Image: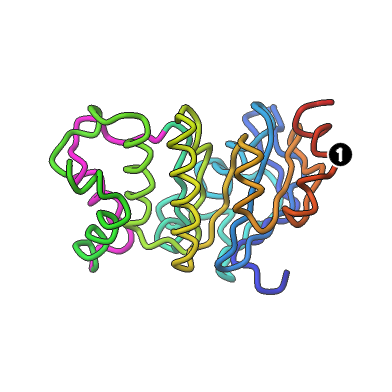
Amino acid sequence: MSDALLAVSGLIAGYGAIEVLRGIDLEVAAGEIVAVLGSNGAGKSTLNRTISGVLRATHGSIRFADSAIERERPATIVARGLIHVPEGRCVFPNLTIMENLDLGSYRRGRVRRESNRERVFAIFPRLAERRSQRAGTLSGGEQQMLAIGRALMAEPKLLILDEPSLGLSPLLVEELFALIRRINGEGIALLLVEQNVVQCLEVARRAYILEKGVFVLHGNSADIRDDPNLKRAYLGL
C-alpha cells in the first residue's frame, strides 16, 4: 500500500528469549480503520507495545508518516501523532477527569489544550458533566471513555485501541463502536485490536487475524467475515 500511514515489515519481538511476534507485516492507510483480531495469547498486546515503542523489536521495521520509528522512544512516537490506548484503560484514579485529559496533551496538542478538551467533552457529554470527579470513581465504561478522550487530546494521526470493549456491557459496546466510527469520521486512522469479531468486521475496512504471533489471514473485512479460515484461526476449529 503506497499511501500507508503505518507500515510494519518483518517484525519480530518478544520478551527475553521468548519470541512472541514472528515476522509481522501490517499496513494502515491514512483515515482507515484496520482490525487485528485474535484470541488471548495470540500476541495482540505485544504488537501494540512494539509499534508504540514500549517494547523494542528484535528485528524488522516500523515506519510511521514516512519516518522509521522502530528505535524511537515512546514519547517521541507520541509526539509524532501515534497514540496507543492500552488494554485496561490505565487512567490515573486519584486525578480528576480534567486532570487526566490535560495529561493527554503533555507531549502533543498542548497549544490547543482548551479547545481539544471541549471537543472531547462534546464527544463524551458524561465526562463533561463529571469533569471534577476523580477517575477512580467512574464506571468501567466511563473510564474507557476517559482513556480514549485523553488520547484524543494528543491530536492523533493514528489511534491504537487495545481491547477497548473488554469488560463492557453489550449496550456500552454498541456505544463504543459508534464512537469509533465518529472518531474515524474526523479523519483519524484507527488500529483496532480486539477479540470482538463481529463488531470489528462491521466497522473496519480491512482485518488481520493473528494466531501464535503470525498473521494467518488478512484482507477486506467483507471477504473475511464469511471465510471458513476465520473459524480456524480465531476459534481453533
| Image quadrant occupied by the N terminus | bottom right
Query: How many C-alpha atoms fall within 10 Å of the one at disc 1: few (<14), some, or many (≥20)?
Result: few
Q: Which structural element holds mark 1?
A: helix
Outermost left residue = 132
Which percent across, then down, holds residue 224? 78, 48
Q: Residue at (40%, 53%) from the top-left corner?
A: 75
Secondary structure mostly seen in the magenta stretch: loop
Side of 125 where 229 appears, left or right: right
Vertical arrangement, residue 57 with respect to residue 19, above or below: below
Q: Residue at (43%, 57%) from the top-left corner?
A: 76
Q: Which residues are magenta?
A: 89-111
Outermost bottom residue = 2
Q: Say which quarter of the image contains residue 113.
A: bottom left
Q: Residue at (50%, 36%) from the top-left corner?
A: 165
Which percent across, then down, holds residue 139? 31, 29
User: Which color scheme is applied?
Assistant: rainbow
Q: Which residue is mark 1?
A: 228
Q: Residue at (19%, 62%) from the top-left corner?
A: 114
Side of 114 where 202 appears, left or right: right
Which percent across, then down, holds residue 67? 57, 68
Task: Identify the amino acid type marked 1.
Answer: Pro
Vertical arrangement, residue 207 with respect to residue 167, above or below: below
Outermost front residue = 171
Which percent across, then down, holds residue 20? 70, 33
